[in-house]
Image (tube, rainbow, N blue to C red):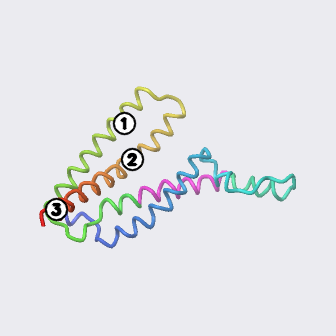
């Protein structure tokens, strides 16, 4: 059994990007607002009316917060998995070697970051860092893999 059998088809890469980009935007917007539901800077200013206060409480309710947190986290994880684990248009042995080396580099960087976080970060901030570390490995892999593929393609274009 080859590594190619374990990869998703190439068309899943586009689906992954379609899921990843909005989920990342939602996650970043919620991060700046403390993961408290719909970011408060997107809501209209609270007016001293009962209806406006109910609307504000609904947007920051426990259910909305949990749903948005799950959309952001699961969307980023599924999106990066589809992007990382989808075949390239031309999947050859060199791409496989680059894929493996990129995965190892991302794993080493992620492990070092977790060790440093465990040594220097405490309390609730540690939980935020661990949330970022949860999605860091596939994101790092994607970045490293894309850079190495770009360098390979640029090098082959320069030879022509």
- Dominant SS of magenta comes to helix
At 46% from the left and 61% from the top, the residue drawn is 21
Along the line of sight, the residue nearer the viewer: 151 or 85: 151
Secondary structure beneath label 2: helix
Q: Position of residue 116 (x, y in %)?
A: 38, 30
What SS does tag 3 mark?
helix
Give how far apart the Cα atoms at labels 2 and 3 are. Answer: 33 Å
The residue carrying mark 1 is 113
Q: Which residues are magenta?
A: 62-78
Circle nearer the N terminus (2, 3): 2
Q: Tell me residue 64's x, y (percent).
A: 64, 56
In the image, residue 66 lies in the stretch drawn in magenta: yes
Image coordinates for residue 96, horizontal then vertical, percent: 18, 59
Residue extending farthest bottom: 11
Specify the quadrant that holds the N terminus: bottom left
**Is 49 left or right of 2, judged from the image as shown?**
right
What's the distance in space between the residues labelled 1 and 2, CA to CA?
10 Å
Mark 3 and mark 1 lie on one chain; the one further toward the N terminus is 1
- Looking at the picture, how far across and down is residue 134, in whole percent? 41, 46
Q: Residue at x 27, y 40 (%)?
A: 108
In the rendering, which numbered label is found on residue 158? 3
Q: SS at mark 1? A: helix
Q: Are marks 1 and 2 in contact (CB under 8 Å)?
A: yes
* Residue position for label 2: 136
């Amino acid at each position: 059994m080859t590594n190619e059998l374990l990869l998703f088809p190439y068309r899943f890469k586009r689906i992954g990007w379609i899921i990843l980009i909005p989920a990342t935007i939602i996650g970043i917007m919620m991060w700046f607002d403390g993961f408290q539901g719909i970011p408060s800077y997107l809501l209209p200013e609270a007016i001293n009316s009962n209806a406006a206060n109910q609307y504000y409480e609904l947007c920051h309710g426990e259910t909305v917060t949990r749903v948005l947190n799950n959309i952001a986290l699961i969307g980023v994880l599924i999106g990066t998995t589809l992007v990382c684990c989808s075949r390239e248009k031309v999947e050859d042995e060199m791409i496989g070697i680059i894929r493996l080396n990129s995965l190892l580099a991302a794993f080493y960087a992620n492990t070092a970051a977790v060790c440093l976080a465990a040594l220097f970060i405490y309390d609730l901030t540690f939980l935020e860092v661990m949330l970022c570390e949860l999605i860091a490995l596939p994101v790092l892999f994607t970045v490293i893999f894309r850079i190495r593929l770009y360098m390979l393609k640029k090098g082959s274009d320069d030879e022509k």
